[in-house]
Image: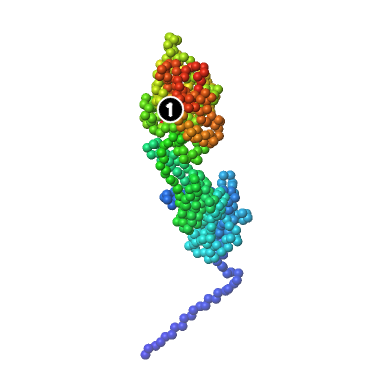
Amino acid sequence: MKKFITLILAIPLIAVSCNKDNVQTSPEPDPEPVPESYEISFSISSTGFSAADTEGETVSITEFSEGDACGLYIINSGKAVKSNIRLVASKTGDILVWNPEDGEKLIYEKDDRYFLYYPYQENSYMEGKIPGNISETLTEEQMFAELAAGWAPSSDQSDQVKFSASDLMIAEGITGQEEDGTVPVTFGMTHRMALAVINKPQTVYDFGEDYPRDYTVTHDPTFPERGLLEYNGKYYCLVRPETASEIEISFGNGEKKTADTGNIEAGACRSFEFNETVSSTLSPGDFYCRADDGKGYIVPQEAIASIDNDTQVIGVVFYKGLHEKDNLSDYTRSLPSGGAALGNTVHGYAVALTDANNGDSDQLKWSSKAITKPDDANYTLDQGTSTDNTDWNGYYNCCKIYDFVTGYAGSYTIADFPAALAACTYGNRTVDADGEPTEDYIWQNRFIAPSDCSGWYLPSAGQLTAIYGQEDLLTGQIEKINAIISDSSREHVRWITSISRYVWSSTEDKNAPSRSAYAVYFNGGPVNWQNKYGNSNIYAVRPVLAF
């Protein structure tokens, strides 16, 4: 039989006394520190328009300046916590600083997003232009989509203020690291309109083989239906992107063109050029000019409207090409008086707009005295020029006169040949008929010969005859230039009006070359021999050049 033994265990009960004064509790955690408040500073710049036709190039027109205003939105938790705050630019030294116009200090909050647009619009205009619910992925384009959709650039953008008022720009700010209690927010503004750039139209007169240097006329256009901003020699107009639009352009003699601006994307710009090349023929009556680089060029007579007082017109063309009777001149040689050198090719000849002498009281002898052998006063000398009163060897003749002076150095100087001296130093003449220093011819500086021509010289009898034969054409052209010039040289710009009507040539008389030279009578045109040094034989001098 099995026996069961029951064990009874006595477990002592421990009584715990709950005395309030002896209760121990866990220490309270320290309170979290209150985050510091940081003010926000703003930096705003424009990224410029990207050139649609030139990769990597940008065009910047609007530059922020003191007084400009932008509209700021601060977004947090999907809503605008600050709406259309007017940020205004002011100058601190040379730095542009942007602050709320009402003086409010904007405090940085974690997770804030900052959206900005320019130029500022009043609250009444901005109502309904911003989304009510703003997602975390919202872009600046989406933020201001309604604003951009309704934006209409003004038809008058003719100055910087008006242009900037149409230049809608937007950006989302980039928050930087706090420094000295300020959190910087930077905006790189992008343009929401498109930009049309109108280059000044040009007409290029191409002379082909007649003359190596083309002439380009740059026109100042007008815009009948719009006011465009002129800046750095171009015209700028903001238009709605990818929206059918045209800009009408007028220039020249009623020329009209149209720029189709309908395919330009937002933030991009496109340049428009309206250039034309015209085949031109070098002709008598064209204008010979000196460029800023010191070289010569031709303004065709049909382009006279492009000439103004700043255009250095120095002569009128009276013959195209090398004349067949200019067969002795060596144009590769420079006259000592001017230093210009033409070279082997002659494109034509031009006559000066003025006489080389200062009116009738300053008319000149061919030589100041009888030119004789130094050791024999009874033996007169010619200077070895051509004696053919129909040829065109004026340049050759002047070279022979200078050669004579060189050959008789110590006995004679170029001042002993006043007509040649006046013609060959025309434009930079500094001495009078006696070879004495004077400032009486400073007005001629306007007519200095270009560096790539023959330089001025005393024409041959044949050249003067050709000039006289085109009196009507040349007089008309010279009078046109007289009407344009506004400086002191204007009173001298005229057709040959010598009281004697005679004009000296460089051609010596074939019958008595040591005593006589030919002069052309500009009242009928006969070529007559005249005493070189007679007191009554003082005549006008009208220079010419080859180019």
Q: Residue at x 37, y 25 (%)?
A: 328
Residue 150 lies, in percent from the top left, at 53, 60
- The residue pinned by badge 1 equals 463
Where 13 falls versus 54 (above or below)?
Answer: below
Give the residue drawn at x 60%, y 71%.
20
| Left or right, residue 358 beside residue 456 | right
Residue at horizontal 56%, vertical 68%? Answer: 24
Q: Name the secondary structure under disc 1.
A: helix
Residue 482 location in percent, x, y?
A: 53, 34
Quadrant (top left/top right/bottom left/bottom right) for the C terminus: top left
In this rendering, the answer to whether 404 lies above or below 3 is above
Give the residue displayed 50% in from the left and 59% down from the top.
140
Q: Position of residue 211 (x, y in %)?
A: 40, 36
Q: Quadrant of the N terminus?
A: bottom left
Q: Number of marks in the image?
A: 1
Three-letter code, disc 1 = Gln
Q: Say whether residue 39 is visible.
A: no
Nearer to the camera, 234 or 180: 234
- Foreground pick, 132 / 421: 421
Q: Is residue 131 above or below residue 178?
A: below
> Front-most of 145 and 357?
357
Q: Position of residue 168 (x, y in %)?
A: 53, 55
Q: Residue furthest bottom?
A: 1
Q: Please state which of residues 423 and 213 is positioned toward the viewer in this rendering.
A: 423
